[in-house]
Image (spheres, grey):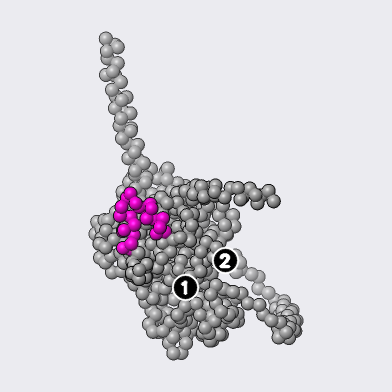
Amino acid sequence: MEASLLPFQALPFIFLLFHTSLVSPQATDTDTTLFSCSAKSSSPCKTYVVYRTQSPEYLEPGDISDLFSVSRLSIIEANDLSSEEGAFLPDQLLLVPISCGCTRNRSFANTTYQIKEGDTFYLVSVYNFENLTDYHLVVDLNPTLNATDLKPGQEAIIPLYCKCPTNTQMDRGINFLITYVWQAGDQISKLSEMMNSSTDAIGAENNYRNFGAAVSHPILIPVSEMPHLPPPLYNTISSVHRKPSNRTIIVALSTVGAVLTLVLCSLLVFAYRKYQHKEAVILETIDFLRFKKPCNDRPASPMTKGDKLLAGVSQFIDKMVMFETRDILEATMNLDEGCRMGRSVYRAALKGQVFAVKQAKGDVKEELKILRIVSHANLIKLVGISTDADGDFFLVFEFAENGSLDKWLHSKCSSSNSVSFLSWSQRMNIALDVANGLQYMHEHTRPSIVHGDIRTSNILLNAHFKAKISKFSMARHSPAGTTLTSDVFAFGVVLLELISGKRAMGTREGAEIGMLWKEIRMVLGDANKREERMRKWIDPNLEGFYPMDDAISLAEVARACTAENSSERPTMAEIVFSLSVIARSCTDSFQKVWLRNSEENIEITNSVFAR
């Protein structure tokens, strides 16, 4: 009888196990969906993260603004600071503005970080960004970087946790969801009071999680209006000095005056000798891609902000350097043809650095407005500006050493033995770079920005072949309700040019005008002949050194981007995800292809080693 009762006695334990199996996944989902997003979210949106000042690198507003790729002015305004000068004490709370967007049902604000000596993705995530991001997400979002061998100067995309309020929340008066990293010793009651929120609202927004187990993890603080954090304390120790006596002042001034006189005399003698020597020396020139002759290397004198700015433009300029027009003209030899890089773009050496200077006429306020807002590793950076008495502008951009993408794809001398040859892995990285830049414009700015002129001639390559989108003269904010699919179509055409090496439109065999977005439908149309047709269609300069599966996958993405029905085109977030998957498998696939192709030359290789 006891044996017969055993199954019934075990029922509570079976039910408990079954109930635990149901609850556990829910707990996991609660953690992972904390920063989820959907169509009901008001994405993209402007929101904030709470950052703690830390010694020694991030104690000044300028350093913190550079870390998050935002303007100093925005941090000053968000925290009611009187000035950007001075250093804070460690562990002071600051609100940092970010642009939050939705990427594959997760909310992130992407910012760009330049790798320094000794950096790892883990240290950058935990130390620099104070757990406002996650190490694994950073690795996944940067498939082209070797996480175990980061090089100084490389640029990584850092996804910051954030979230936009839903339409329902906004109807209830919740305008911001502020990201805050929970600290040991935090109390929900004190935090809600400091952030001008409520304990119930914070608990509900975070799924009533156990905050005691949330140390060093980001949470969300729902607020109706911007909170006023405690005023940050400044480090005033360095400014406290004992008042010197008059005798001390006289002695100090006399000493400084004598030293300055000696230095000045030495500089005059040095300058005179250098001038005499310079006349007898033939200066060597550097061949920069397609430039005929070098441009003047005279240093420029930066001006103070606001000097010589036309009315209505100064509001769009924050961290840019102001250059004198005469310095621009001298650096470009009065806009000489030898310095011309494009129709109105010139190479110029200013302050010992090489820049690209664009001569802009007419109203540039809209372009400046866009360039002031955007900050991304895959968008060309506006460094400075100059304007003359006639109202003409010179926009000074970072210099892309390898020129525009079209020159590499469509050069007449293009071949595998030519300098202007792009390998398959380089093409994949360029595609992913451009996609990341467009996703940032579409989904991490508010309102979204449409570039309006994506083409290979407007994609520049730096010394490491990192792609940067340029020419923002046609870029505009996208009004609510409008689509961003024109950029998606144009990006699909760029993909097709990367794969085929052909121009988007051009004369094909038999004097027929061909269009790549129509050709690819013919190539991929018949599944049985797809691989054969792809081999004939792919850029012959690649000479078979590409993984066919990845090439077909990339062509499929391009075909989807160039769908005739704009509603059928994917979003840039979906494109970035697809390209990341292809890029991740590209290395292994390419190595297999290389080994297979190299087997044919194994005897030749051995004979070389024998010699």
Taking depth in this image into account, of 152 and 145 the one nearest to the observer is: 145
Is tag 2's residue or tag 1's residue first in the polypeptide sequence? 2
Taking depth in this image into account, of 383 and 215 the one nearest to the observer is: 383
Q: Tell whether 110 sits left or right of 41.
A: right
Q: Can you give x and y, in whole percent of width and height, for residue 93 in the image?
A: 46, 59
Q: Can you give x and y, in whole percent of width and height, for residue 158 in the image?
A: 46, 57
Q: Residue at x 72, y 79 (%)?
A: 256
Q: Tell whether 474 sits left or right of 606.
A: left
Look at the image and give the residue range highlighted in magenta. 517-538
Please rate how many residues cluster around mark 2, counting C-alpha atoms within 10 Å: few if below 14, some from 14 to 19, many from 20: few
Q: Residue at x 43, y 87 (%)?
A: 391
Q: Can you give x and y, in whole percent of width and height, for residue 54 in the image?
A: 53, 58
**In the depicted structure, whether residue 275 falls above or below residue 355:** below
Q: Residue at x 59, y 54 (%)?
A: 118
Q: Is residue 523 visible?
A: yes
For label 1, the residue is 382
**In the depicted structure, whether residue 310 falls above or below residue 182:** below
Disc 2 to disc 1, C-alpha distance: 35 Å
**In the depicted structure, whether residue 403 falls above or below residue 17:** below
Q: Can you give x and y, in whole percent of width and height, for residue 346 in the image?
A: 50, 79
Check disc 1 and give the amino acid type.
Leu
Q: Where residue 236 is drawn, which disc sits there? A: 2
Check disc 2 and give the amino acid type.
Thr
Taking depth in this image into account, of 522 and 41 the one nearest to the observer is: 522
Give the structural element (helix, strand or loop) at label 2.
loop
Please rate how many residues cluster around mark 1, counting C-alpha atoms within 10 Å: few if below 14, some from 14 to 19, many from 20: many
Give the structural element (helix, strand or loop) at label 1.
strand
Q: Where residue 223 is drawn, which disc sits there? A: none
Taking depth in this image into account, of 36 and 393 the one nearest to the observer is: 393
Camera-nearest label, 2 or 1: 1
